[in-house]
Amino acid sequence: MEITWLSQGGFLFDADCTRILVDPYMSDCLEFKGLKRLVDFPLTFEELHPDVLICTHDHLDHLDPGTVSEIAALYPECLIAGPESCCRHFRKLEIPEQSIKKLERGKCFEFNGIKITSVFARHTEPEATGLVIEADGKRVYLSGDTEYDKRLANDFTKDCDLLLICINGRLGNMSFEEALKAVADIKPRTALPMHYGLFAENTADPKPFIAGCAKTGIKSFEMFVGGGFEL
């Protein structure tokens, strides 16, 4: 499985000749709230080629309306998935009903042999979800936006191969200290910090989290926007 960080909570997963795109924020639509992006989105629409687009919740840096509409227009065969709140937004964007997939917590669906499970998250958007993606014999847990909660560690997420976890500590998300508590609960083989570096008003230093993982023997390193790595 090849994984590319796209900034904030956005990722591209390549596995089994299938591309799963999660939470791409490609515009600057939050600038009206004073949140101007610090880094460019690393790929063009023409480079994405997603088979599945997932939005974990209905906040603009995760469900970017312009981005979703453009992807739907360019890639009409792409399945567009999310919890019910996202599905309502997809319909407002006139995404065809046959292209929409509703995600329900604790339930999974398979696409080209890849298993995707919607899991618990505790966020200011009540229907927000985390994701567990299973492919190529690996299990990846993407926390999405969430506060710390013991329920983040569950039968789907415990002992995963990779945990991608938010550390920004603002607006309904964990701080790096809380993220380290979640790591201790989940016990992944590798834990990588995300959801920082896009907005000056909502960022954090990843180094203390990485150092904290190292102290407990869990592998961690700093990802770079647009940089891919293999799991």
Image (cartoon, rainbow, N blue to C red):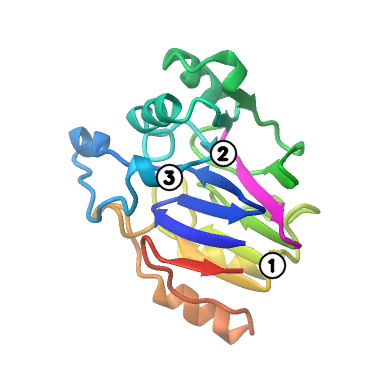
User: Residue 194's quadrant in the figure?
Assistant: bottom left
Q: Which of the marked residues, 3 or 1, is nearer the chain's N terminus?
A: 3
Q: Residue 136: within the magenta?
A: yes
Q: Which residue is mark 3?
A: 48
Q: Which of the marked residues, 1 or 2, is nearer the chain's N terminus?
A: 2
The residues colored magenta run 127-137
The number of callouts visible is 3
Q: Amino acid at mark 1?
A: Asp
Q: Amino acid at mark 2?
A: Asp
Residue 161 got which mark?
Answer: 1
Work out whether residue 24 can be spotted.
yes
Q: Residue at x 37, y 60 (%)?
A: 226
* Residue 32 sits above or below residue 184 on the image: above
Please identify the quadrant where the C terminus is shown.
bottom right
Q: Residues within 10 Å of mark 1 (few under 14, many from 20)?
A: some
Q: Which residue is mark 2?
A: 51
**Left or right position of 174 against 105:** left
Q: Secondary structure at mark 1?
A: loop
* Residue 62 sits above or below residue 227 on the image: above
